[in-house]
Amino acid sequence: MRSANHSSLSGNANREFDIAGQELREGRLAEAVNVLSRASKADPSNVDLLVRLGIAYRAADRLDAARYVLERAVRLAAGRHAVARLTLANVLELDQRPDLALMQYLLGLHEARAAGRSSGDSEPDLASLLDRAARYVATGRRAWFERALQNTVHGAVHCSRRIQQALAMYLEGRAPNIADRRQRPGPLHVPDIKTGCFLDRACFPWLDRAAALIAPCAGEMDACIAAAGAAQVSVYQRGVLQYHARQHAPRLLRALAELPLAQISHEAPDVEIFALGAKARMPLQYGRANSRCRVIINCADGGALQVTVGGETRALEAGQSRVVDASFGIEYANPGANRGRALLAEVWHPELSGEEQGSLSALILAAIDFDMRLQELNS
């Protein structure tokens, strides 16, 4: 392999690079390693030399040494040398470290695409590495999520058709077919959910009790808003309890603990409170997924609100509650003269069975874990 950087080597290093290539082609692996080791010591910041040395170590079945020098090459390249990353991934694959290999292959594909390289590239080593990476990533990512499903109560075998379809679209990067163009699909969009902007209250038999539990908490909600100095304050953000609610809203937290909120570690629920002064509005927001709905409970001692979802507007009188599908986009307005306050909480869409909720939770957690590991490697 002669990369673009090869021409920038010193004359001596250039000759040793060529000598090592000849040694590799003729199977004299120890000699190739020795030549490249000397060259890399003389030019320690040259990524091409380190990659070639890693290849020599790999050919000699010295995988630990190959990994060491290739990790160094990747650090030095700082995302600008796809061959270094992909060769490291291949070494990790050979060393039976499938999860690390998967991450590095995926990062290598991203680097190649950022540089405008493809599997049809004229550089043979890169083309074969990209082909291998694409196959490995496709298989490995699916296996990653299927393992997550297997660990649920019902396992992957009993995963519903529409959850399987949601996973397939996510893995393949396909946009779902949306019957109502007002709806904005998010990650792991679940197809064939019978939904609308405003959902039937009969699907949420616990809603009146929820409003009764929240009603005495208006003072705590005011305290959170005052302490934050903001009109909109998170109580839970991606399932994590926030500071102001912890400090000022113990009764509200006890009330929320009795409600069937969507519970996914580090993902859901989102719960927030907001206050709207006379004639004030909140900008359009979209929910993260069509698998979850938003409960809106208007405080009994405040003003009436208007809730607009997907362009449809409904009144929300003081003390009333509604459930909406926020994937259609949601806006809030206070048309009156009295200050309004409301609580918003995330719940599962009633169309989803308990098994489907469990499957989605597992897939979301697997996606979060995957993305966090990828970020750690790329940091």
Image: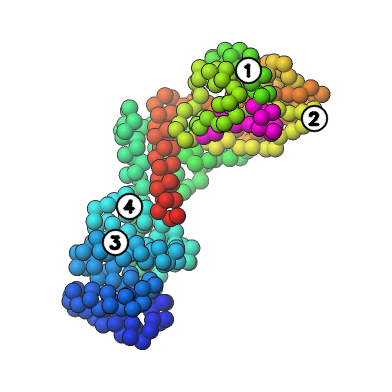
Q: Quick one: SS at disc 2? A: loop
Say left or right for 275 vs 350.
Answer: right
Say left or right for 25 vs 136.
Answer: left
Q: CA distance from mark 1 to mark 3?
A: 58 Å
Residue at the disc numbered 1: 217
Question: How many circles with numbers are drawn on the protein?
Answer: 4
Q: Which residues are magenta?
A: 224-238
Residue 90 higher or lower than 361, as above or below: below
Residue at the disc numbered 4: 100
Q: Give the residue type that dot 4 points to.
A: Leu
Residue at the (25%, 78%) spot, across then down: 35
Say left or right for 220 vs 3.
Answer: right
Which of the numbered marks, if any, corresponds to residue 279? 2
Q: Give the residue type that dot 2 points to.
A: Lys
**Is there CB contact under 8 Å for labels 4 and 2?**
no
Question: Toward the viewer: 41 or 365?
Answer: 41
- The mark closer to the camera, 4 or 3, is 3
Q: Give the residue type that dot 1 points to.
A: Cys
Residue 141 higher or lower than 123, as above or below: above
How crowded pointer 3 is (Cα within 10 Å; few <14, some 14-19, many 20+) is rated as many
